[in-house]
Amino acid sequence: MSFFGFDPTGPSSSRGLDDDQLETYNYEDTYEGLGDEGDDALNDETFGAASSNIGKDFDFTGGMGMKPAAPSQPTTQHISYAQAAQTDEILQPMASLWTDESKAATGERPTEPKILSLEEIEAKLRGNQPQQHLQMPPPPQQQLPPYMLLPPQIQQQILNAAVASGQFPNAAAAAQAMSQGFMPPPPPFNQGMMPPQFMPFPPQMAQQQMLNIPSQFNQGIPPMTQQQQPPVDASQQQQQQSQPPQQQQQQPPQQHQIPQQPKPQQHQNLKQQLLPSQDQQQARTEKRDVDFPVLGATKEEPGNHITPQEPQTLPQQQPQQQHQQQSQHQQQQNYRNNYNNSGNNGNNGNNRHHHFNQQQRQHQHQLQMQQQFESMTPEEREKFLTRQQKVSKITRCSGFMNPRDKDFVTRFQLSQIVTDDPYNEDFYCQVYKVLNSSIHENNMSSIAQKYLDQSGHRLGGRSKRADVALQRMQQQVSKAVTVAKERGERTGVLSREGALGKVSFGTGKEPRKQLVLKTKEESADAEDDYLPKEYSFSKSSRTFQLSIIENIYSQILKLESMERENQEFTTVELWKSLHLSDKMSTSSGEVIGPFISILSFDKMMKVFNRLFHFLTAEQKFQLIEYIFTNLQKIDVILKGSYKNYIQENYEVPEAVTKKIDLFQLTIMKTLVLYLSESKFQDVLRVLDVVISNNNVLFLSTTKLGLSLVTILTSRLELIKQEFAQSLSAQDLSQWQFVYDKLFQCLEGRLTTIFPPYLSNDESKKVKTSTSGADDSYIWQFLASLSLAGLLNHQRIIVDEIRNEIFGIMALAKTSNESGDVEKANKALGNLNLFLNVMGLKATENDISELS
Amino acid sequence: MSEITSTPVPSSEPLDLIKLCLDEQIFVKLRGSREMIGKLHAYDSHCNMVLSDAVETIYYVHDSQSGEIKSKTKKSEMVFVRGDSVILVTDAANV
């Protein structure tokens, strides 16, 4: 596209260099594929349907031939400037929110926010060139220091003072410095001037006004071309205007900046995107340069900053500047024609009207503020001005992003939040939602709502409705979700043709890696069973046990996530990870299975229930059998026996008691649940396994061992009594056989099941910190043992533990006497649990038959 | 029953050694002459860690002339250890 009638094919000195620099930027990586979408839906809207057909042969005179239009046509010009500048930028976001508009109905902008690819952005930058400078609505407050709005005589005073103070060589330099805000602000004055914030004219409006003023001023200021000048030549610009001979020198840079040469311009724009801070700054300065004279002209204040020579030099400048202005105007005209051609005439008119209203409102507002300012006291004004200065500082950088940029950034941020796999990546949030939300809410809208709330984002702005903003955000979210889904298939490492190494790219979940380690699969391919030495642990080592547990955990987590998603799963891997068929030797030389050894780790106990849940019925029984076979090898049970602590006065360490409690809450609970639903034969088999493979006498000295045996015997006896019909004679005789075996193991040594610290036998009992703890498990065992036994079994039991029974009765008596009725009742309750089985009942004084 | 032919390797990344210690007592050596022993609840790639029932031991020079070093201990029920101060992490059983 060409501007201002320059020949686009003309040679450019900086062209080659720019091209080189351009090549070095590759943003494919950082854009994360967000831009891999369709065409820009708004190109047509922006340029008219015929935009693609626009060539370089613009007719800048609007069909009037090559003859430049007469320079004395400011009134017609001013409409087109404002129009062209306003239509696009203001129209689009508004139009997208006006649902009754035909354009919004087509769903171009609001319903289908597009993401641009790099190429598209480039193309757009190229195509958008003429509009960009006009569109950009720079915050007006950034352009003028407040005192620039002071009346001319006061500004003149400041200037004089500044020059007198020796800060500046002459009045022109001082004026320049002041215009750029380099001068310390003077004390506030009160000549009825507007503070900068209440100069809401965007530059194009200023231009429009400017065009209404005497042409002398108008022509003294080339409105557009100066925008492109780098900030350094701000003062040169002034000189240029005042000193005609230098004009020729200034010409080349000016030409260079004119966006007629597509390549450098494109480069500059790209750079503007890539290096926002630098270029924003530049843009800011540029604007200041431009708007300063423009606003000055608007005020029609002669001599406040323009050096006295200026008017004299104007005639020489005129032709060129006229031409520039003219061509620009034609450009606008051209653009507008295109726009109208695209069939948006009605819309355009509507917008024009709207724009006009806005303009009027702004003007009224401005007047109002001016009046307010006049009526203020000096202190108030001072406050007011400082406040305005603060505000202008804050808002200095605002307005650089258009709605589309904001959309892009929003989507970029959202794409980091949303995930395709919420249960794995966002587990706690999901759980939290389940726990806290009684109302089932739409996922998209909740994310969008959350985002809006959290970011303090008002997409729609103050004047627009919040639900529209929410709706837009929901669309952004759904878009981001699809992108996230597509992204999920990528691995994060990309081999590109021509690249020397592998290109890695980061996401929020998976940051860019400094090192790309070979994955397990890759190394497995390379060498089948190769393991680095440091990862093969000795089989007895703690690290080995811990790694088994971690393996089990990862299997379980995998299965749990499959279960949540109702996928088919097999437990083969999990079963393998239990290492049930393996053996390892402990440090003491004993050979035990790894699974038994890890059962004593807290985290293994905690995961046992989750593990058990996934096993098949067959696997479950196998596991149960395995555990009961190796019962006395389980560390918790082994260490739980009071026999280990004879040296320590039977004081069981606290760590062990804690582990025992944990075992009861986790593994034993699971086992009890399983056994309480098991068949008679299975339970009988398990009991048989326990008795055959373990030292029952030793097991009975542990709380856990005794409890487990109690569970088995009571379950068997329960089934026998309730479902006797369903049991075969063989089952019953088998049970009798196993019971006899069990009883034989304990006969004569039944008192050993009472740990000394729980015993009430005077000759045996030991006082420890755990004395007086719950001994009900012992009485439960005795009860189940006597329940399953015959009368002679019961007699033997009572005979053996006679001392304990009387001990309990004595304890109950002393407790009652000392007023501790609760303790007495509890002790008697436990005793009666056992005695009731045999039809007896104990009080603190005697034992009687149960009535 | 067969002997184990290969030991399980959950993964071969360095931090997996810390993963093994989850829910176990670990020993952490920290900058500023500090050590900590506690149960590891969570960690991340920066070695940020959450420990429970942690005992922190701080060593300091009691007498600068004789170079006598003393230590204080501090107990915390639950503590977050920021990863940038971590020098060493190991199973407390190894210490």
Image (cartoon, coloured by chain):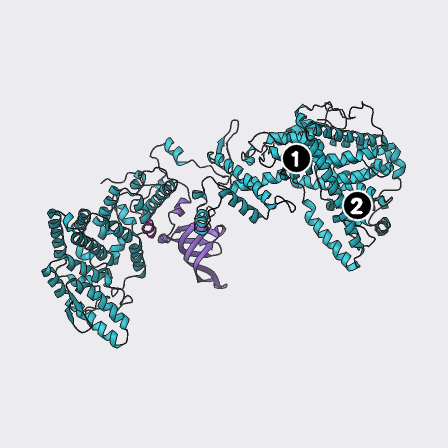
Q: Nearer the viewer, residue A730 or A807?
A: A730
- Mark 2 element type: helix
Question: In terms of sequence position, does the residue under pointer 2 or pointer 1 come before the other?
Answer: 2
Label 1 marks which chain's residue? A
State how many labels appear: 2
Farthest residue in the left direction? A792
| Quadrant housing the N terminus of chain A | top right
Q: Give the image location of residue A292, x and y in percent.
A: 79, 43
Residue marked by disc 1: A271
- Assign the C terminus of chain A to one quadrant of the image: bottom left
Residue annotated with mark 2: A179
The magenta-colored residue range is A601-607
Image quadrant in which you'd find residue A523? top left
Residue type for callout 2: Ser
The quarter of the picture where residue A187 lies is bottom right
Decide: is A764 above or below A332. below
Identity, as a three-letter code, of the amino acid under mark 1: Lys
Q: Quadrant of residue A306?
A: top right
Which hue belongs to chain A?
Answer: cyan
